[in-house]
Amino acid sequence: MTKIRVFVVDDSAVVRQVTSEALSKAPDIEVIGTASDPLFALEKMTKAWPDVIVLDVEMPRMDGISFLKRIMKEHPTPTVICSSLTEQGAQTTLDALSAGAVEIITKPKSGVGDFLRDASSDLVRAVRAAARANLHRLARANAVPLPPSPKLTADAVLAARQAGRVAMPKTTDRVVAIGTSTGGTQALQAILTALPAVCPGMVVVQHMPEKFTAQFAQRLNQICAVEVREAKAGDRVIHGLVLIAPGGRHMMLKRNGAQYVVDVIDGPLVNRHRPSVDVLFRSVAQAAGQNALGIIMTGMGDDGARGLKEMRDAGAETVAEDESTCVVFGMPMEAIRLGAAKKILPLGAMASEIEHFL
């Protein structure tokens, strides 16, 4: 078995040690080196280049973003950002995603060692996702399992529709629901910046940690004709508005008379995620039925696949992103396998599909 070769760059000796120990426990991962800053890392990596880099953002001599931009230009390499969970750090980490990082693992300012030990399975999954990333897509935008952790379905948050219940009739009020994960920040930016100000109301789950989604929404709002903001409970879904589920909370669509609104709630991890695409898609199937368009895009795992199938069964239009444009063809692949997608489209065709759904 060929192992995933990983290099860890962090100015904290504790983080380097704990991260290396956590990754080395996975039988398909080998940590080939560590460094306290990017310049030391470059010296070591030229002798043995890794498959994946685990990278801190704030470091001496050269910051992580400058290092990442250099790497993506000279030797594109899938990179997982391991960054502190702060409002200021959120903006910096989003810069890293824009520079080509594949995934985010958040770490607290204190108790880092214990945190990384507890989050070791998330770190391993992130490295595996990065190793499978489509580097061509990253550049243009710029396994052996662990013992299983509990993987709840959307039933843990929202009950499935009872058999025999009829989906609501078709109306002129339309909703677009999008679910995405690894590589999704770049993909969402590509779609939303291509949309005109007048388009269907949209609800979005992007797998992203708490505190990062508000900054992400603000950044998109600055560059898009549509309005983009982090969702709050009770927000209406209206034309020209994109609501992004807050990190650490589930978002569901509800019908309030003739209007659509969102509810934002706590709850268990579903498919190891909160927010979960399956929770959103199931709620859209129940609240909007054939008045909805569901789109599942790049991401590792299968979150959203079953929910998209429920949307299709309820009469909704459903789309999966084509493998050719995915950073990671996991979530769309599972949706296609389940027969959940009526259409399979490349990323460049998504904006037109949404615009014509109005």
Image (tube, rainbow, N blue to C red):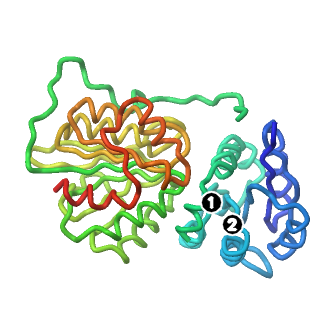
Q: Residues within 10 Å of mark 2 (few under 14, many from 20)?
A: some
Left or right, 341 with reference to 41:
left
Q: From this view, report whether residue 268 is shown above or below residue 234.
A: above
Q: Position of residue 25 (x, y in %)?
A: 82, 39
- Given contact means CB atoms under 8 Å apart, are the residues at marks 2 and 1 in contact? yes
Left or right, 48 with reference to 221:
right
Quadrant (top left/top right/bottom left/bottom right) for the C terminus: bottom left
Residue 185 visible in the snapshot: yes
Looking at the rendered structure, the secondary structure element under dot 1 is helix
Q: Position of residue 226 (x, y in %)?
A: 27, 69
Residue 88 visible in the snapshot: no
Q: Label 2 is placed on what type of residue?
A: Pro
Q: How many numbered markers are drawn? A: 2
* Marked residue nearer the N-terminal end (2 or 1): 2
- Which residue is depicted at the point 72% across and 59% down? 110
Residue nearest the observer in this picture, 163 or 345: 345
Determine the CA span between mark 2 and mark 1: 7 Å
Q: Label 1 is placed on what type of residue?
A: Leu
**Given the current orientation, which residue lies at the most extreme bottom position?**
61
* Residue 327, picture quadrant: bottom right
Query: Label 2, on which residue?
Result: 76
Q: Position of residue 192 (x, y in %)?
A: 34, 65
Query: Label 1, on which residue?
Result: 135
